[in-house]
Image (cartoon, coloured by chain):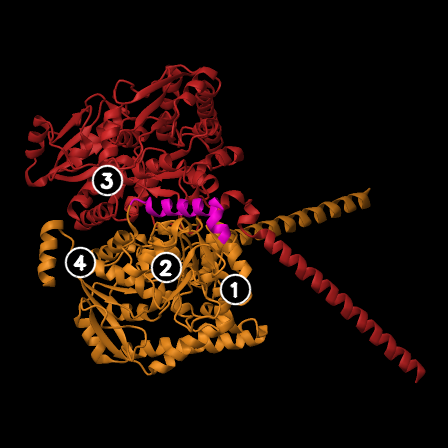
Chain colours: A orange, B red
Amino acid sequence: MRLIICVVYLAVFGPAQCGNILVWPTRGSHWINLKIILETVIDKGHNVTVLVPNPSPFMDTKESDRFSYQYFSVSMTTQDMQDFLNELVHFSVYETDQLNLLQIQIKFYELASKHQDMALSYCDGILQSPELMDKLRDGKYDVVLSDPHFPCSDIVAEELSVPLVYMFQFSIAHVLERMCGQIPSPPSFVPAGMIKLTDKMRRHTSYCEMMGKADIWLIRNYWDFEFPRPFLSNFKYVGGLHCTPAKPLPKDMEEFVQSSGDDGIVVFTLGSMIDKMPKETSNMIASALAQIPQKVLWRYGGEKPDTLGENTKTYKWIPQNDLLGHPKTRAFVTHGGINGIHEAIYHGVPMVGIPLFGDQTDNLAHMKAKGAAVVMDNIKTTQPQDLVDGLNAVINNPSYKENAMRLSRIHHDRPVKPLDEAVFWIEFVMRNKGAKHLRVEAHNLTWYQYHCLDVFAFLITILTVVLYVFFKMCKFFIIRCCFRSKRKSKKE
Amino acid sequence: MRLIICVVYLAVFGPAQCGNILVWPTRGSHWINLKIILETVIDKGHNVTVLVPNPSPFMDTKESDRFSYQYFSVSMTTQDMQDFLNELVHFSVYETDQLNLLQIQIKFYELASKHQDMALSYCDGILQSPELMDKLRDGKYDVVLSDPHFPCSDIVAEELSVPLVYMFQFSIAHVLERMCGQIPSPPSFVPAGMIKLTDKMRRHTSYCEMMGKADIWLIRNYWDFEFPRPFLSNFKYVGGLHCTPAKPLPKDMEEFVQSSGDDGIVVFTLGSMIDKMPKETSNMIASALAQIPQKVLWRYGGEKPDTLGENTKTYKWIPQNDLLGHPKTRAFVTHGGINGIHEAIYHGVPMVGIPLFGDQTDNLAHMKAKGAAVVMDNIKTTQPQDLVDGLNAVINNPSYKENAMRLSRIHHDRPVKPLDEAVFWIEFVMRNKGAKHLRVEAHNLTWYQYHCLDVFAFLITILTVVLYVFFKMCKFFIIRCCFRSKRKSKKE
């Protein structure tokens, strides 16, 4: 069947070749974007094989029979991995201000070590299995697609001699892009995200050298969200590629939405990772939401809060993109996950942000700076009145809606749709066996060569020698003059 | 009629608005690219008004009745301008190695002053005419299109409060892009063109501030020609937008080309500015061309050389793009003008370069580095055998053809065609009244802020104070200790 698609595609669209794509394991919001690209390349006749760790708590291999799956064994158990993730979320959201700086560092180091163990167990599961590596070699892959938050794809791609395409939003303090991708980041106007966490990555220079071999870096960002900055010819900004026009809502949900009248609705979600929030938090949120005239659709899987108002309905899951694209939607309350923000930008919906952890603080800071969001400090210190004030501001002060619509226009008004651009560059790498013509020479320079310090050192040495010789000669002539005049005066 | 096109366009393609475009005067190869964009935007229903200096030796206002022309008076005569250009070419091609360094500097300063006078006469001709400025204001322009080699468009755009789009290849030593456009150019791997000429521009910081207001910089380059480098979100690489598939040749030319048999043809041109070369030069070229088995089509308007071979025909004008796209074409001998190089890349033709002046040396250095050209030092020192060897190399050593074809693939294999991309961004600026969301914050920083020197200075000050206090305290305690022990020892 796939062969037929491929042949038909070739006949219709000409010399685009149908190839084999190997996908590095990923999960959660990272997977959402990748999956949309994969669906598209399959539509174009390519074969997609997804690497899946076994055991795997995060990847549901039943979700699409269009992908092939290649399992590999990892030494960690499902419980280990789930525990790690829960620990990370709990630490980031609830523990950081109960601990002192030293305790935070120790805990962070612990978590970082666990993350590294997990990464290494993936790495070993693939590289230490000769049968699997042979099978992958036989797969004759044209490209490896990977999110660098889940490391080791670079080494496997190198082992298989296959070009590598990265796709991600941004790394901690832009370290990966800057040091491995050689993207220039003048700190004077390119804000560094999550500075606290910088140290860990910097020790791994060989890691960086491996990463630097990626042919294309697909960045899940665009200038609707990101501040303008320098970038390189092999960095492609494809943020928001998962956004689509809204589809109709389920019938009962549509009825609830329509019941809101002119006041409209508020869409509320803090993401999938924080379903079990403390009771006082859910009560705080519920009591705030009860005070606004809008109807609220709250994605919340926990126990029903006592203070839940009549205008608020909780759902275990909501069709977020379809709700954000609904004409009745007035505001979006979000934890600041990048996918949700892109959807809000796509549909031009102003936001109220409650950042939980990770990149979310940064993401919301961007939206605040662009005038499309009011942002709370964090979920623990937020009072009901803060949330009510924030919602009233973004709903009733027209500047927030105007700014959200401006970002939406920027998002839509580009020469190529982000999904098409992402697919184009993946196929480009497959067609051309890489994209070396986009690779800056900076990869082959040391840091002192990059900054021309070797040239400066050489010039300063020359200058020093010249000055030294000049002064020596001056001294020599002055002394000779003095001696002469002394002699003269003696003779006289 | 244009209104009808506009209405039809609106009906078919939706909300693209039809607007008014003001074009700054330009000439020669700069005009070729701009004209193609203008033709395309007129096809889409926009109105184009070209500013034309009166007198004008360079712009033929009869060449298209699709543009409106707006004349303005300049104080220089046609002869002044033509003389200046002849003087510039003669100085660059023939005089530079007969003069010593001081003479070159003086001559260069003279020429630069004349160029500045010419630019100022354009500036005055528009800005000092209240009637013309009123007329331009009444024109309700949506965008000014300009090549920054012909200055003053930034001031006029500012006066009219109209967004500005620049289009050019690159400036002397990248000074304009770097200092006015804030594009990062680490000198360690971004080669600076024509370094000799740097000083002049650097004095004009207010000039730079004005230029920095341009919304989009359309760069007549792409990664088939340019080395990969950092750039900014408002720099769009649209090089080669003027290239098209080859059209059939005139009948007699096609017959001559076909008579070449399997050996094929060589296309030879040194551009439009050097028709009157010294007799020994034209004889050198002709005698070299007589030695190769290919047929040669030589664009040359001068007297027939004595040594012209039977295989060579001279033409006052040749359809260069159509010849380069002809299947019989084996090589292109070029002075290295950027338009010709883009055409050779487009059609995958290897080159022999004879640089004359300006950016041509740099352009050819790029082609040599990418393995698609053999390059002579300059036209005066080239011997017939050098030219024959160069031609034999690029025709018979397959690596040159392979590299030219690789560049051609890179040129064609991009998500949007360069002409479409250029038009897209011009229309974007018209639709959105500018493109401020692509403007880096670096424009608002001083040089020491850009490099974070203010932050370093602050940190070093703090460190110095802390160290100073620390040493003072140490000294104090040591002295006290010493005194005590002295007293003790006295008491004892």
- For the point 13% across and 33% down, the residue is B247
Q: Chain of mark 3?
A: B
Q: Which residue is mark 3?
A: B352
What amino acid does circle 1 point to? Answer: Asn
Of the residues under marks 2 and 1, which one precedes in the sequence? 2
Give the number of the mark in front: 4 or 2.
Answer: 2
Q: Please state the total of marks drawn on the protein image.
A: 4
Residue contact between numbered discs 3 and 4, judged by CB atoms under 8 Å: no
| Quarter of the figure with residue B53 | top left
Q: Which residue is mark 1?
A: A378
Image: magenta residue range: A392-415
Q: CA distance from mark 1 to mark 3?
A: 65 Å
Q: Is residue A14 left or right of residue B365?
A: left
Labels 3 and 4 positioned on one and the same chain: no
- For the point 34% across and 18% down, the residue is B57
Q: CA distance from mark 2 to mark 3?
A: 52 Å
**Labelled disc at residue B414:** none
Q: Residues within 10 Å of mark 1 (few under 14, many from 20)?
A: some
Q: Tell me the element at label 3.
A: strand
What amino acid does circle 4 point to? Answer: Asp
**Labelled disc at residue A339:** 2
Q: Tell me the element at label 1.
A: loop
The kind of secondary structure the magenta stretch mainly shows is: helix
Q: Chain of mark 1?
A: A
Outermost residue on the bottom side: it is B492
Q: CA distance from mark 4 to mark 2?
A: 23 Å
Name the quarter where the C terminus of chain B is drawn.
Answer: bottom right
Q: Is residue B215 left or right of residue B303?
A: right
Residue A439 visible in this rendered orientation of the protein? yes
Residue A413 falls inside the magenta stretch: yes
Q: Which residue is mark 4?
A: A43
